[in-house]
């Protein structure tokens, strides 16, 4: 249950999960199964397809889970962007690269999957979702957590949820 997962923290009896870098959605599914609202962000198209497949297989979660199929970055991030699988034992760890010269040639030459990715700010997503409040925030974006949170604006603030990295 969500309560067991974050047992050492005081988890409110209700509230949403913000799952940034949701990968295949382990945290998302745990919270959805517990009846919580989930807002997920995933940049890697391979993981997005797996995430959507899980939603199709669990239709009861469709009304409570929202997936933003995009990468998040700060206001200075510029595209175009690509996301590729990472070398090693976890092919689901997407590596985001943005800039004019970025492409998939090197990744594909190394046998890794690579696809174009969209890029937005976390503040833009939150605004589009009606600026929800979260009981828990899980963020795993391969060392880019600070960039994903940066805007110089409203998020994160002391009124937002504790962060699990």
Image (cartoon, rainbow, N blue to C red):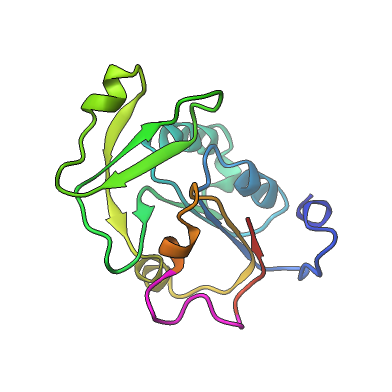
Nearest to the observer: residue 165 or residue 42? 165
Please name the residue shown 67% across and 52% down the image: 31
Q: Position of residue 132 (x, y in %)?
A: 52, 73
Please name the residue shown 83% across and 52% down the image: 4
Find the magenta span and give its range.
150-159
Nearest to the observer: residue 128 or residue 94? 94
Q: Chief secondary structure of the magenta span? A: loop
Q: Is residue 90 magenta?
A: no
Nearest to the observer: residue 1 or residue 10? 10
Q: Position of residue 88 (x, y in %)?
A: 52, 24
Q: Position of residue 150 (x, y in %)?
A: 41, 70
Q: Quadrant of residue 86?
A: top left
Please name the residue shown 45% across and 67% down the image: 149
Image quadrant where one finds the C terminus: bottom right
Nearest to the observer: residue 143 or residue 27? 143
Does residue 58 appear to the left or right of 95 in the view shown?
right
Please name the residue shown 54% across and 28% down the image: 90
Does residue 3 appear to the left or right of 111 in the view shown?
right
| 87 w.r.t. 70: above or below | above
Q: Quadrant of residue 47?
A: top left
| 116 w.r.t. 110: above or below | below
């Amino acid at each position: 249950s969500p309560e067991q997962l974050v047992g050492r923290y005081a988890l409110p009896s209700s509230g949403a999960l913000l799952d940034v870098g949701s990968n295949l959605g382990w945290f998302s599914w745990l919270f959805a199964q517990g009846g919580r609202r989930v807002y997920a962000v995933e940049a890697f198209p391979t993981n997005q397809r797996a995430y959507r497949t899980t939603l199709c297989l669990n239709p009861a979660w469709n009304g409570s889970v929202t997936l933003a199929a995009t990468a998040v970055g700060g206001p200075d991030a510029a595209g175009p962007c690509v996301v590729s699988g990472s070398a090693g034992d976890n092919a689901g760890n997407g590596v985001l690269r943005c800039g004019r010269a970025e492409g998939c040639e090197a990744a594909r030459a190394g046998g890794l999957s690579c696809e174009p990715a969209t890029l937005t700010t976390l503040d833009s997503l939150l605004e589009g979702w009606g600026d929800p409040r979260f009981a828990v925030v899980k963020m795993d974006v391969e060392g880019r957590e600070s960039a994903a949170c940066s805007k110089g604006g409203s998020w994160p603030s002391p009124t937002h949820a504790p962060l699990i990295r």
